[in-house]
Image (spheres, grey):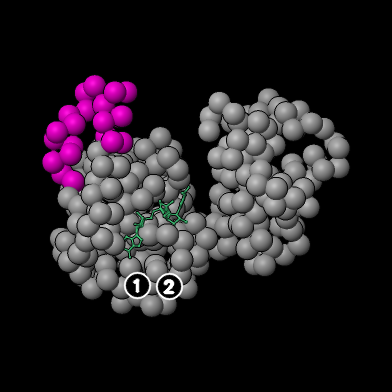
Amino acid sequence: MSTAPIPPRSVGVLGGGRMGAGIAHAFLRAGCLVTVVERDPASADAARDRVLDGIRRSVERDPTVDEVEVGARLTTGTDSAAFGDADLVIEAVPEDRALKEEALSHAEAAMPAGAVLASNTSSISIDDLAAGRRRPERFLGLHFFNPVPASALVEIVRGAVTSTETVDSAREWVQALAKTPVVVRDSPGFASSRLGVLLGLEAIRMLEEGVASASDIDAAMTLGYRHPIGPLRTTDVVGLDVRLGIAEELERALGERFRPPDLLRRLVADGKLGRKSGEGFYAWNEER
Ligand SMILES: NC(=O)c1ccc[n+]([C@@H]2O[C@H](COP(=O)([O-])OP(=O)(O)OC[C@H]3O[C@@H](n4cnc5c(N)ncnc54)[C@H](O)[C@@H]3O)[C@@H](O)[C@H]2O)c1
């Protein structure tokens, strides 16, 4: 008989921006105590508003959620000492190696020795970050997707010295969020970016070579392969500049097959970044 996965009792989140607020939201909804630590009081207030806004929107979709009860389990502040009783701390500060190193050091100085420390990095090597850790066997990547409350996937990124016990705890905690974990060895682009970006780059090359129109290339994937929106529309939603940055990094790490097509570089240089700028492979006037 299988038992329901049990969430951690207390979770710390370092950085309450777009991803950190979503991660806090997801653990609050699973019944956890959640502490979000930000860099200054104004950012802590903004993080609190962001998390509470998200909860308010989820109440509109699901009236059984008790907004007051969920909100009462949230603490926000500026001092990592608040992670003193955490079972799990997730770092979600901006994608800057030095910033992450510093944030992770502060967190691990405060958290209990038996707790698990995770980074939500989308591209920095978990083994590189593990090198500076006090307890590297209790450190891993937890790669959440945006928007966190609505996304079904979390990549668990296992470093060379991450213990099996740590991976098992992470797997159970992700399942307790009603999300599906996939376990990936620390490697460039993990599983999701590596495959998703490669498909997007080939679709751009096909457009460049005049193989088919953008909407026909996307239709080939949505109707032929059940891709949800097609690789070009996905690139528009993620941001052409974001995809270009990842492709350049993967080209350095994995070689020629990730070389960004000229068309992608041209569109980014012209400020056509996809949905956020109003135009990419498609026009997005209504969604800006
Ligand atoms: N946005 C995405 O789609 C996405 C998806 C997956 C992973 N990620 C990764 O998640 C991480 C965070 O990205 P984001 O989009 O949420 O960024 P963001 O800029 O929205 O949020 C980062 C937050 O960290 C705070 N911060 C900065 N320095 C801090 C410090 N020293 N201590 C505590 N807080 C600090 C900032 O005030 C900000 O609120 C990055 O590593 C990013 O690569 C992002």
Residue at image position (31%, 36%) is: 54
Residue at 25% over, 54% down: 42
Looking at the image, the residue that sits furthest to the right is 210
Classify mark 2: residues with Cα within 10 Å, few (<14), some (14-19) or many (20+): few
User: Within 8 Å of ligand 1, the CB of disc 1?
Assistant: yes
Q: In the shown orientation, is residue 160 left or right of residue 20?
A: right
Q: Amino acid at mark 1?
A: Glu
- In the rendered view, tell whether residue 152 sits above or below residue 185: above
Q: Are marks 1 and 2 in contact (CB under 8 Å)?
A: yes
Dividing the picture into quadrants, the one containing residue 166 is bottom left
Residue 67, compared with residue 271, is above or below; it is above
Dot 1 surroundings within 10 Å: few (below 14), some, or many (20 or more)?
Answer: few
Judge whether residue 66 is colored magenta. Answer: yes
Image height of 216 relative to 254, above or below: above
Q: Give the amino acid type for the residue marked by disc 2 in the picture.
A: Ala
User: In the rendered view of the protein, which quadrant contains the N terminus?
Assistant: top left
SS at mark 1 in the image: helix
Give the residues drawn in magenta, as a range: 53-74
Mark 2 highlights which residue?
A: 98
| Alpha carbons under labels 1 and 2: distance apart | 6 Å
In the image, is 269 to the left or to the right of 36? right
